[in-house]
Image: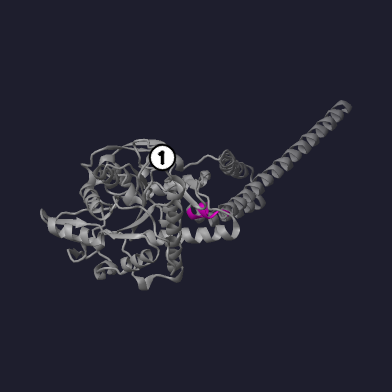
Amino acid sequence: MLIYQVWRANDSVRVDADLQVMNEERETESRVFMVLHAGCGLLCVLASLALGWRPGIELHWGWARKPLVAIGLISLLFGILIRRTHAARITSRVCIVWSSLLIALAIGEAAFRIARYDFRRQEVRWRSCPPYYRQPMLPSGKVFFRRSGPEQWSGPVIKTYLQFAGCDPTPYASEEPITVKYDRFGFRNETELHDWDVAIAGDSFTELGHLPYDQLFTTMLGRRFNLRVLNLGVGNTGPLTQLSYLEDYARAPSLKHVVIVFFEGNDIGDLNREYMALLDFEATGKRPVRQFRKQTSMLRALGEQIRRIRYPVVPAGPPVDAVFMGRTGVVQVTLGLLPPTQAELSKLTRDALQRFVHDYAEFAHKTRVRPWLVYMPCKASVLSGQIQPTEQASDSVRTFKSTDLPALVAELCAKRGIRFVDLTPSLREETHRSGELLFNALYDTHLNARGSAFVAEELAKQLDFAADSSVPEPRGD
């Protein structure tokens, strides 16, 4: 009996001990359960806040912020209310998986940002684009930029750019590939010159990066006069940048003439931006900087990829602003930029024009060269009166006739002793006479090969390079 009582007592002790252990395990499991759910809820709230931290991330993932907060609150409620072991284990596993996913995304986001990995590979894409359509990135002069060099690029220029920009390249399906070469300063001079007689600066209408070197009007002009012509044309630049190119790269022992080709389509806007940058530099000493801004966010890259899958981009067709009744029939055309009138010019623009003309004349006088300004019209000015606007044409295209801007530029040039050549009348007359376009028809609005050749012929008539290059004293306003 005594033995039985002792056995029962020991058994009771063991049972109590086992119960105590089980209770402790349950309490531990309950604490772990609470920590898991509370941690998961906190992570969800933090993730919601993080998605609103950067506009680029919120743009793609802003829709997930409220659901994340809701999931976080539900997780906390489960941690408080659920006590059944089986249900608790299931929700705990869900919390572990969900928390692991959020932590992995956070680690990935931080790692790619620290590594400065560019998901858009902007510089790689930039270099795959034809140089003609790239924005100059290398600092030059006070506040200006130029292309890097030397460089050589081969392929169909316009077709490649249209594919790069997500447009329909069909109008240029038969475009012949060419090879373009840029010198060490980023200009289209295939033959390395150590001395030259004429320097011509301008924007994309002077660079003409979609044409072979032999078809540039600068090349043909040099051969016509048997002169060495330096091409300083760079797209996406304005008159002040082009003047800076002449100051920095055009000086040579044999230099007699300098030319700036002023394009009415966008040189006014470019001039405004350059003038404001120059004023800011003169006031603060700080110059603008152009550099690639890396897209280092993994979440933003993931959101962009999902959006591309959900909303695939369909290549846009060419904007047809008008039809041209040519010699071979109806030709659809894109008109592109329209020039402003004098009445539309702000005081800032007029000040910028006067500053440009003044500085150009001063440079020519100090360098002892003859300055010229060639006025290049846009396609709309040349085709005015010879086209029929389409239904999709804007009101500005429908009402456009001509601009009085050439008269203002000519007046400013005359005051400073700069010889002025307006190509508008001759280009318009040649188009009417031949019934053929001198510009690319669709998308691109630059001179085609025929237009470049005609400009060379016209400049050969109007630019008196054989005359004495002595420069008269610049007159005041």
Q: Which residues are magenta?
A: 53-59
Look at the picture and state if 246 lies above or below 362.
above
Q: How many marks can you see?
A: 1
Residue 369, percent from left and from top: 39, 52
Left or right: residue 57 versus residue 31 is: left
Question: What quarter of the picture does the C terminus occupy?
Answer: bottom left
Left or right: residue 312 versus residue 18 is: left
Whether residue 169 can be seen here = yes
* Structural crowding at the residue carrying mark 1, measured as other residues with C-alpha within 10 Å and reported as few (<14), some (14–19) or many (≥20): few
- Decide whether residue 233 is among the magenta residues: no
Residue indicated by mark 1: 127
Question: What quarter of the picture does the N terminus occupy?
Answer: top right
Query: Which residue is painted at 35% across and 71% down in the image?
Result: 342
Query: Which residue is painted at 77% across and 34% down in the image?
Result: 18
Question: Looking at this view, is 336 or 293 the one in front?
Answer: 336
Residue 406, percent from left and from top: 31, 65
Q: What is the magenta segment's predominant secondary structure?
A: helix
Whether residue 441 can be seen here = no
Local SS, label 1: helix
